[in-house]
Amino acid sequence: MRKIIDFLIKNIHSLTFAFLLLLSITQIIDKNYYHSSKFNFFSNSLVNIINEEKQNLVEYFELKEINENLINENNFLRNNYSKTNKIDSLISTDNYLFSSAKVISNSIKFSKNFITINKGASDNIEIDNGVISNNGVIGIINNTSEKFSTIISILNTDLIINAKVKRTNHFGSLSWDANDPGILNLYDIPKSADIKKNDTIQTGGMSSIFPENIPIGIIQSFNLPTGSNYFNITIKLFEDIGSIKNVYVVKNNFKDEIKKLESNNE
């Protein structure tokens, strides 16, 4: 204890200077928008870099599992290519551009969850790009920096996605109610629709964000409230959002043209 007191007395001037300097910097950041925004940008970038290095270390110890997933994905792509290698000349195959990315941070415990990936503006990632995985829809890009991007997760109560019942082609709106992270709710499917348990749910293609027919999940249960013309439907997701490591960012090459055209109608 005596040594600690002697150290404090001996270095009182240096410690006082360091304390006042830290206090001044804190006040500058807190009271000035420009300095605050620069500090937040730097700190977020530093956190993202640390998370990326952490993710790289984790992946090193999971190489066997990653390789198995890649083999399964390659088999899936080969099988689908063999079925669809005859392409109709009237169908464009270059509407969407897919680019891979790694998840470096993720959350599922809040009502408004976000995901961070290791690709950003320098990789041509843009706000409103869709994000998918091998098993389904993950979310939509909502912010980018030079090297990183954040995603509004499908497990975010602010996100609504156009979806359809594969077997009947009926369209509705898909959203999360902040309860079970494996279950979403599908609305606006009319009572005239002949839906069944385990029917597959896919993206509807009614927006410029996701291509049509990206898998989402299956119907777990449904009911028709008294006096209502629309079903309440619960959807079990194909993807375990809490365990995703690799995703694909989806860019619609004609998104700006579509938006400009639609804005003319307004």
Image (cartoon, helix red, strand yellow):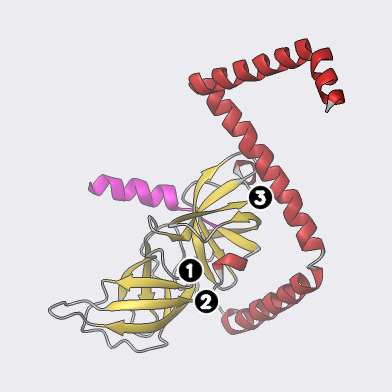
The nearer-to-camera label among 2 and 1 is 1
- Where does label 1 land, which residue? 181
Q: CA distance from mark 3 to mark 2?
A: 24 Å
- Where does label 2 land, which residue? 238
Can residue 32 be seen in the rendering of this structure? no
**Label 1, residues with CA under 10 Å away: few <14, some 14-19, many ≥20:** many
Give amino acid for label 3. Answer: Asn
Q: CA distance from mark 1 to mark 3?
A: 23 Å
Q: Start and end of the magenta stretch?
A: 250-266
- Where does label 3 land, which residue? 118
Mark 2, secondary structure of its residue = loop
Please state the horizontal and vertical placement of residue 72, each as a whole percent of the image: 70, 79
Q: CA distance from mark 2 to mark 1?
A: 12 Å
First in sequence, mark 1 or 3: give its number: 3
Give amino acid for label 2. Answer: Phe
- Please name the residue shown 80% across and 68% down the image: 63
